[in-house]
Image (tube, grey):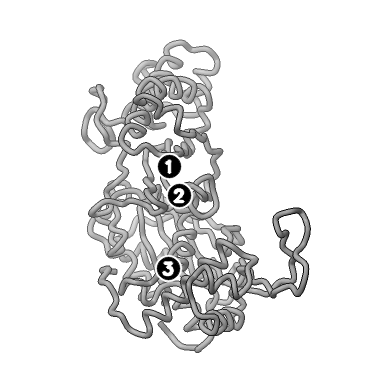
Amino acid sequence: MNELVRRGTRGLLRDMNNSRVLQIIQAHGPISRAEIAKIGDLQPPTVTAIVNDFLRVDLVRETDLVRDNGNGSAAIGRRPILLCLNQTAAFAVGVKLRQHGMTIAVTDLGGTIVYRSESVLPNHTPDEALRFIADRVENAIEVAAINSTKVIGLGIGMPGIVDYRNGVCCFSPLLEWEGVHVTSTLESILGMPAYADNDVNMLTAAEIAYGAGREVSDFLTVTVGQGIGLGIVLRGEIFRGAAGGAGEFGHVKIESDLLCECGARGCLEAVASDVGISQQVAAAKHLSSIDIIEALELARAGDREVLAIVEHAGEVLGRSVGNLLNLFNPELVIVTGEGTRAGDLLFAPMRRALEGAAFGTLGRDTHLVIQSWGDEAWARGAASIVVHEMLKPPIYEARSAGPLVHLLARSIHGGTT
């Protein structure tokens, strides 16, 4: 998936116009053909030809909805035929990999989950694991009773450093993968576009597409749970860094000598993640181990020692998020993940510390959202990456056989990408 810029050919212009028209319909629909031409600076015959292709595959539909003219009444005169995106015209598959398992979600273009499954991930070599994943994906599509020509691609999220451009898992301690060519292997087996990314970036993609970040150009997603992660959105696009390593927030160093699971000392995760809190509680209570749920129950029951550990975790997390505000000045910060079940035990001290750490008015200017959590959100986010790619201009070679081209080629021309 090396991203070389495509040469200025007629095919590139066609693909870019297709993408532009679909973006406009998705963002502004129901919308008329004339309005699409005006917004996209396109010739009306070009728009008509593209829309006809979209209608043929049922990607868009004509509607007789009457739009308000802004003063509470319908426009007078002949109503133009309006177009809207058909959310069930195509489907995407999202996979969330964990240390020993995975969640698969099949979604429509609107992000609605139409099928979900859980599987144990066998302790195989990466190649064997990828073949197993491909088999489970094929099974999910079959059980969901979806025509395979309507599946526009696969997104797969995993913990660790992932090179999104090239589809390579560079380093994942939890999966014990290094230098694994994820997307090329899955594409060769499944015959559809595939995209691999860090799991927090996948979750962030869902916030861009369907969530709190939909109308926000600059925001951060902080995940708290077994680890601590960060998704960075700048000018509407996910920032991944030079090699996919941006957002390893859990491994920023703080004033602590606690040992992190990564092998280093002083990581934020060692203090404020579920694992870090559990380990501190176990040490304080002279236990070999304790579950985070049990630890939180002790805190809620008034155990001062445990409550102090959780509150300290919240304070450290708050100062660290405050530093993010100073660095990025986002409009919005979304905090999510299974760690949100701690509620105000963790987030009350986090908010106080955040306000103290943010410079000047930055804390007041940033909207903070604590997002309720559902396990399917990760896989839904992975699927949303595919939809996101479908709406992007295909100006790179890696996009030349992307989701939209793939759908049109299979559905209209009966060909392959």
Q: Residues within 10 Å of mark 1 (few under 14, many from 20)?
A: many
Against 231, residue 411 (above or below) is below
Identify the element where label 1 is drawn.
strand
Q: State the residue position of label 2.
A: 203
Residues tagged 2 and 3 counted as in contact (Cβ below 8 A): no
Please indicate whether residue 303 sits to the left or right of residue 174 in the image.
right
Residue type at mark 2: give it.
Leu
Please report contact status of discs 1 and 3: CB closer than 8 Å, yes or no.
no
Along the line of sight, the residue nearer the viewer: 311 or 408:
408
Q: Earlier in the sequence, mark 1 or mark 2?
A: 2
**Rendered residue at 53%/59% (across/down):** 105
Residues at discs 1 and 2 in contact (Cβ within 8 Å): yes
**How many badges with numbers are in the image?**
3
Q: Earlier in the sequence, mark 1 or mark 3?
A: 3
Give the percent coordinates (x, y) of residue 362: 39, 29
| Apparent side of residue 263 relative to residue 197 in the rendered image (left or right) | left
The amino acid type, in three-letter code, at marker 3 is: Ala
At 29% across and 76% down in the image, what residue appears?
A: 6
Q: Position of residue 247 (x, y in %)?
A: 32, 44
- The residue beneath circle 1 is 221
> Which residue sits at x=40%, y=82%?
417
Q: Earlier in the sequence, mark 2 or mark 3?
A: 3
Report which residue position mark 3 lands on: 134
Quadrant of the image containing the N terminus: bottom left
Percent across and percent down for residue 178 are 23, 55
The answer, for residue 238, to whether it is visible in the render is yes
Query: Is the residue marked by circle 2 packed among few (<14), some (14-19), or many (20+) residues within 10 Å?
Result: many
Q: Amino acid at mark 1?
A: Thr
